[in-house]
Image: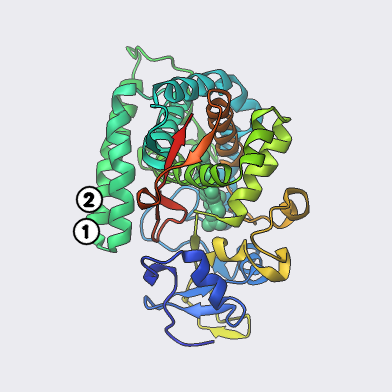
């Protein structure tokens, strides 16, 4: 282990995966220039993610429901919230997601470069999430703008800028909550947002601050994740015409979803989550003090040759069991079904309406930099 080794945050202009691929065989744990301990190996990431007592999620002074909460309190929130994201709860939205995807695909130009992330991924994610939450279409541009501002603020590491961006999102969410208050509401009181506002945890209603935090989790972070994932998926399909045709010819949903998971394992754009140690811990042969700030690097763990052999070899069936794209342990992503459903529908509609999806000019492609992975820009050409 080398002290103060830069991690993903410092690897500007490099493919973050190449960087952690290089470090991982020699260092399971590295310390970055922010003083955080970054876990790179699959076994160590799994160990920390499942050791909820010694690796706490209470990493922030801000309210983060449910991701910043530990133990029984966390379980109570998950029990109240997970039902919103179950396959059964999402089934009624399939038609709306398909409509969003097919309208967007129809609006994209053919035979000229289109940016897979901003013109397809972000727009699709924002419209699909708004359809799910029954948010007004007029919010689309504000949400799109917010995704970009949020990435830029996090990348800058500037706390006051991050606070401003968080405040802007809270204002946006409160504007959606307001018309759902009171009896004169013109909205359908059974929409997802309204039902969330009536949800109780441990026998008491959620506070406004909790609702804002949950909606921030369900939209703010994840719009960006879905958009980045779509960029990765389209890069993979554009460079593998055989796979593209296989999917275009129609495969069962379960097979489609397994292929999506495996493509994202190879190039996981959701890089890491944080923990803080509650006592001294030894992990990967490294002694961490109590209060150590730790990062679980999912992207690196998902490419650990000790588990996956050649990290770039796509083997959906073999690798599914160890895939960490959606995390592991009590904080495992509750949005997995929604994310996979949306991504499958987006790809199905795009493939159905095209003969081919090819890569565009290389100078219009650029890898993303931390805190997100995948592609910042990716030109594709639809025919
Ligand atoms: C492709 C998109 C997505 C990826 C790659 C992703 C990935 C992850 C990962 C790795 C975690 C674990 C965090 C940890 O252990 O600290 C997580 C947690 C979480 N995700 Fe997702 N996610 C995605 C989409 C979504 C969506 C669409 C939603 C909701 C609408 C969502 C809601 C959440 C929430 C609330 C948590 C915190 C759970 C907890 O702490 O108990 N995610 N996600």
Could you tell me which residue is drawn at 31 percent across and 49 percent down? 150
Tell me the quarter of the picture where residue 311 sits: bottom right
In the picture shown, does residue 199 fall above or below 359?
Answer: above
Observer able to see residue 326? no
Q: Provide the residue designation for mark 2.
A: 164
- Image coordinates for residue 286, horizontal then vertical, percent: 58, 85
**Crowd around label 1: few <14 · some 14–19 · many ≥20 (10 Å):** few
Helix, strand or loop for disc 2: helix
Q: Provide the residue designation for mark 1.
A: 160
Q: Nearer the viewer, residue 164 or 57?
A: 164
Tell me the quarter of the picture where residue 28 sits: bottom right
Could you tell me which residue is drawn at 54 percent across and 32 percent down? 356
Horizontal side of residue 373 vs 54, given as left or right: left
- Image coordinates for residue 4, horizontal then vertical, percent: 42, 84
**Crowd around label 2: few <14 · some 14–19 · many ≥20 (10 Å):** some
The coloring applied to the image is rainbow
Q: Which mark is residue 171?
A: none
**Mark 2 vs ligand 1: CB below 8 Å:** no
- Image coordinates for residue 42, horizontal then vertical, percent: 65, 67
Could you tell me which residue is drawn at 39 percent across and 46 percent down? 361
In the picture shown, does residue 232 fall above or below 203?
Answer: below
- Which part of the image, by quadrant, shows the N terminus? bottom right
Horizontal side of residue 59 vs 242, given as left or right: left
Could you tell me which residue is drawn at 57 percent across and 81 percent down? 27
Give the mark count. Answer: 2
1 and 2 marks in contact (CB < 8 Å): yes
Task: Give the distance between the C-alpha atoms of the residues marked 1 and 2, in whole angstroms.
Answer: 6 Å
């Amino acid at each position: 282990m080398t002290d103060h080794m830069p991690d993903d945050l410092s690897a500007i202009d490099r493919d973050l995966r190449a960087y952690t691929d290089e470090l991982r065989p020699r260092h399971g744990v590295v310390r970055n220039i922010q003083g955080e301990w970054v876990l790179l190996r699959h076994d160590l990431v799994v160990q920390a993610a499942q050791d909820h007592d010694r690796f706490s999620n209470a990493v922030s002074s801000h309210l983060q429901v449910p991701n910043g909460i530990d133990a029984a309190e966390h379980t109570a929130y998950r029990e109240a919230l997970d039902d919103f994201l179950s396959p059964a709860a999402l089934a009624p939205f399939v038609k709306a997601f398909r409509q969003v995807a097919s309208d967007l695909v129809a609006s994209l130009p053919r035979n000229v470069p289109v940016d897979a992330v901003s013109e397809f991924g972000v727009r699709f994610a924002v419209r699909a999430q708004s359809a799910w939450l029954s948010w007004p279409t007029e919010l689309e541009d504000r949400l799109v703008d917010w995704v970009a501002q949020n990435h830029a603020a996090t990348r800058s590491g500037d706390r006051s800028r991050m606070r401003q961006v968080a405040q802007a999102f809270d204002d946006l969410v409160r504007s959606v909550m307001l018309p759902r208050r009171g009896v004169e509401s013109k909205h359908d009181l059974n929409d997802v947002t309204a039902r969330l506002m009536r949800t109780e945890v441990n026998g008491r209603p959620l506070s406004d601050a909790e609702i804002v935090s949950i909606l921030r989790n369900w939209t703010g972070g994840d719009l960006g994740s879905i958009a980045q994932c779509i960029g990765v998926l389209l890069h993979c399909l554009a460079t593998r015409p055989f796979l593209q045709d296989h999917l275009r010819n129609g495969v069962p949903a379960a097979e489609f979803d397994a292929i999506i998971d495996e493509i994202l394992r190879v190039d996981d754009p959701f890089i890491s989550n944080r923990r803080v140690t509650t006592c001294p811990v030894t992990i990967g042969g490294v002694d961490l003090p109590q209060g150590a700030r730790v990062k679980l690097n999912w992207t690196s763990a998902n490419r650990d040759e000790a588990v996956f052999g050649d990290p770039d070899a796509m083997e959906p069936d073999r690798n599914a069991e160890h895939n960490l794209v959606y995390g592991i342990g009590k904080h495992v992503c509750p949005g997995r079904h929604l994310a996979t459903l949306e991504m499958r529908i987006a790809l199905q509609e795009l493939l159905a309406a095209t003969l081919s999806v090819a890569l565009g000019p290389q100078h219009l492609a650029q890898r993303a930099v931390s805190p997100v992975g995948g592609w910042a820009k990716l030109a594709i050409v639809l025919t």
